[in-house]
Image: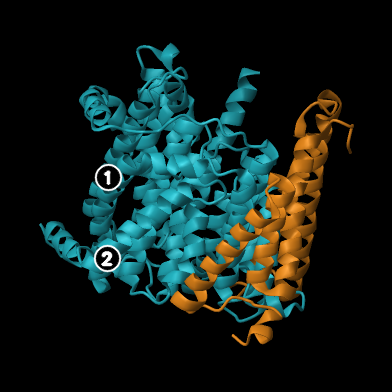
Amino acid sequence: MKTGEHLQMRWMELLVAACFVGVSLLVITDSLRVGNAWGSDGPEPGYFPFFIGCLLLGGASWVIVQTLLAWKQDDGKEVFAEKHEFNLMLLMLLPTAAFTAAIFVLGIYVASVVFIAAFMVWQGKYSYFKSIAVGSGISAALFVLFEVWFMLPLPKGFIHTWLGY
Amino acid sequence: MDEINNLFQGFAVALTLPNIGFMFIGIFLGVLIGVLPGLGGANGVAILLPLTFGMSPTSAIIMLSCIYWGALFGGAITSILFNIPGEPWSVATTFDGYPMAQKGKAAKALTAAFTSSFVGAFVAVLMVTFLAPVVAKFALNFGPPEFFAVQLLTFASFIGMSKEPPVKTLMAMMLGFALAAVGLDSVTGTLRMTYGQESLLKGFDFLIAVIGLFGIGEILLTMEEGLAFKGHKGRISLKDVLDTWKELPKHWATSLRACLIGCWMGVTPGGATPASFMSYGTAKRISKHPEEFGKGAIEGVIAPETAAHAAGTSALLPMLTLGIPGSPTAAVLLGGLLIWGLQPGPLLFTEQKDFVWGLIASMYLGNIVGLIVVLTTVPWWAAILRIPFSIIAPVIVVICAVGAYTVHNSLQDVVLMLVFGLMGYAFKKLKYPMAPLVLALVLGDMAETSFRQSMLISKGSLDIFVSTPLAGTITCLALMMLLWPALGFLKKLSRG
């Protein structure tokens, strides 16, 4: 899939089209389960989804066929992303995923402080003091805005019981 | 003139002190959203929507629509000063706006952009004022078959007019429909595509999709491009403004064409982004000196900005009168209406007069407020853009996460947002358009319900969609739109 310098467009095209095929199969299977016939009073619940699934499958197959037909000609020249670009993207995606997981444990306020501060130290080379200050500031602003001002509770994780708020 | 009376009543509603306050807050937030990467009209409004649940619907929609106007204005600032389109609809503005800034004419470009935005929006609001009541009255006669025909037209015109490959547009749209169908079937009460997952019972909320696709997706893309901020100074003196204003009337023809394109693209669901490109292209083709385009021609700023604002504003016309949004942001506003307990559609004009006309009046006022705000505060926004991406990016991710959570107070939604974000990234790269996906997700249930209601009326016969002149005409139009790309394909074939 990787040639060293870049991710090839054709492989990504196939990968995404394959995901579409997967989704379309899920849709079609379920529409057959609930009934996809044309009843006496019009379509059954699965009638529409069945067609949607078929169109998805058709479209995805079309993309796959087109990609394969152009395979030789393309020869991996078309670039989805340069490797260093893709790595940069991962540097954003993975911390974001970690942040999402952290919300479940730490609650959104603490997770935000850690996420913002860590990202600043790691990516921006800021001092610990500055980074934690910015993170805490944003988190405190969120707290005032949501909990105090608009009274919309956000997830707090374990500090909920710890602080007794 | 009924409309004028209603409009003045609307001004009375909009011109209360709290509402003017909301207008200013909305414009400020909107410009901020427009300037920051990853936050835009659609997801910005989606994130802020939960904050308005406690407000009166009129104040809420005034604030949210002002956020939208603000975002439209804000996109121009980043395009001209930094060559970074803050919003997709301001991509075309970078073509000539940035070269103008490089030549030291940033103030002129900014003034031209803001003024054109204002003109475009103003013309579109005039159209909404006088056309919306007519359309609404007309639409009162609509039954399920007519509504389905209009919805069909909406989807068909996406495929017909899309810049992206038609197959991919179709796939994105079908994915939206499929996601919309998940959960409880509204006609028979059957559970569809939940595969035993309890969290899927309520289906997919399009607000989460919007926040993920447009917000997280954009942040990932921006990160990948490794943003280097090389901005130009943005400061506008009164003299710059007056000088530019003296020059602008010369370009009235460009402006007028852009307004027409914008209004048309906004009402038929093309949206602001294709409108701005189309307008730029037309201006270049018709111009007497097309070679100057791309090197800092002022028409190259006027055309896309006017069209984008005209389209953005007129997208609210089908939303208010038919309940069919003309753009993703209008779709989010539509979602807001439903949450506040208002049923969008023709009845809104007879039953919720204060609301509708308050909103229309606020469009006039909001754009005046917007013009003043952006003209006076440009340096400040330019300074925000100089905040390094390593600070801005995590903050925006946090804001998106909070926004996704507050829609249903569900942490699963935050995970879902991340998935949609990754999808947005891949879709953008592989040229799958996102607007049809979002609109299909919003309209999917509605379209299916009106189709099945029609079938109940006609006892299962498809003839009902061509049996009345109105439904028949709209259905035919829809089919023509749908076949448009096929025609182009045949032409290409015949030419060999």
Amino acid carrying label 1: it is Ile
- Asked which secondary structure carries label 2, the reply is helix
For image coordinates 40% across by 74% down, the residue present is B340
C-beta proximity under 8 Å, tags 1 and 2: no
**Residue in the image at 35% along x and 62% along y:** B63
Q: Chain ID for label 2? A: B
Whether residue B475 is visible, yes or no, is yes
Q: Nearer the viewer, residue A26 or A162?
A: A162
**In the rendered view, would you say A156 is above or below B227?**
below
Count of marks, rendered view:
2
Q: Nearer the viewer, residue A128 or B188?
A: A128
Determine the image quadrant of residue B146: bottom left
Q: Nearer the viewer, mark 1 or mark 2?
A: 1
Against B429, residue B462 (above or below) is below
Within 10 Å of disc 1 (Cα), the crowding (few <14, some 14-19, many 20+) is few
- Residue B107: x and y in percent read 35, 29
Q: Which chain is cyan?
A: B
Say if residue B148 shows up in the picture.
Answer: no
Amino acid identity at mark 2: Asn
Q: Quadrant of the N terminus of chain B?
A: bottom left
Quarter of the figure with the C terminus of chain B: top right
Residue B276 lies in quadrant: top left
Chain identifier, orange in the render = A
Q: Measured along the vertical axis of the image, is residue A68 above or below residue B370?
A: above
Q: Residue at x 47, y 34 (%)?
A: B79
Q: Locate residue A23, reporting x and y percent.
A: 76, 59
Depth check, front residue: A105 or B428: A105
Which of the labelled discs sits on residue B372, or is there none?
1
x then y, percent, for residue A34: 72, 75
